[in-house]
Image (tube, rainbow, N blue to C red):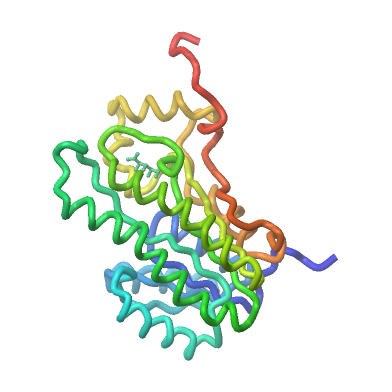
Amino acid sequence: MTNLFDLTGKVALITGGTHGLGLAMAEGLGSAGAELVVTSTTPSKLEEAIKYYQSKGFKATGYIFDVTDEKIAAEKVAEIEANHKQIDILINNAGIIKRVPALEMEVSEFRKVIDVDLTGPFIMSQLVARNMIKRRSGKIINICSMMSELGRDNVVAYASAKGGLKMLTKNLATEWAKHNIQVNGIGPGYFATSQTEPIRVDGNPFNEFIISRTPEGRWGNPEDLAGTAIFLASEASQFINGQIIYVDGGILATIGKPSNE
Ligand code: GCO
C-alpha cells in the first residue's frame, strides 16, 4: 500500500507560515516531503523562518505580500506558480485578532480583522483554485478556530471572521469538489502561541479557565496540529470535503464540569 501521507513532489503554500501554528503545520508538511512556500508581511520573520526550514533540510522559499491586497496577491501567486511548477496545497493560516469589547470596537478595527481572517482566505483560495481546477487536483485548508463554533467576550470580529471562514470552507467545497479539489478546515483549540500569550500568563483567570475547560487539561502545542495538516494535505483525505476538523483537546465535546469535581 502506498504511503497515503507522502507529500513528496507537492508544493505547499502556507500564508503566515513564519511562526506559531503556521510554522508547525509547515514543518509537518515539510517532514512529509512537501516543498514549502511561505508568505509573510514581515521580512525579518520570513527570513528567519526560511532559514529554519532549510536547516531542517526542507526546500523552502518565502514571499512578502499582504493576502488582503487582491492585485498584489494575484501577481505573487502567478510568480509562485511560475517559480515552483504549481501550488498543490494552500493553507490559509495568516490571521490577526483584536480583543476588544464589542461596544468599544472601532468599525475600522472590525473591518481589518474580517479582511485579514476571512477576505484574505477567499482571495487566496480563488487565485490558487484556477490552476487547481485546470489540473483537477488541489487541497485547500482553512485555519478556523473554536470561535468558528463558539462566541466569547472581546473577540467579536475574530469570531465573526472565523465563523465566516467555516462557511467559506463549506461553500468552496460545494463549488469545487467536482474538480477534485478538497477544501477543509482545521479548528485549533487553545494553543500556546504568541497570539495567545497575553491570555496565557500565569495568574490570568482565562489561563486556568481554558485548562479546566479542556478535557485533556492543557493548552495545545503547535506540533499537535502537524498530523491533521498532513492528513488534509495528502491523498489520505481525497473523499473528505467541507469538513472542519477540531484539534481542541476535547473542548467542543463537553459542556464542562463544576470546578469542585
Ligand atoms: C482568544 C484566543 C482564541 C484562540 C483560538 C481558539 O482570544 O480566544 O486567541 O481565539 O487563538 O482561535 O480556537
Residue 61 occupies which quadrant of the picture? Answer: bottom left
Front-lying residue, 179 or 231: 179
At x 59%, y 73%, the residue is 34
Q: Position of residue 31 (x, y in %)?
A: 60, 66
- Could you say where residue 44 lies in the image, as x and y percent from the top left? 28, 71
Residue 3 vertical placement versus 189 (above, below): below
Q: Position of residue 117 (x, y in %)?
A: 35, 57
Quadrant in the picture for the N terminus: bottom right
Furthest-front residue in view?
A: 175
Which of 185 and 199 lies nearest the eye of the viewer?
185
User: Residue shown at 57%/66% (left/top)?
Assistant: 175
Say whether residue 85 is left or right of residue 102: right
Q: Position of residue 58 (x, y in %)?
A: 54, 74
Is 70 on the left-hand or right-hand side of 256? left
Q: Quadrant of ligand 1?
A: top left
- Residue 64, image quadrant: bottom left
Q: Is 225 located above or below residue 94 in the figure? A: above
Which residue appears farthest toward the top when viewing the image? Answer: 260
Would you place residue 78 above or below residue 4 in this image? below
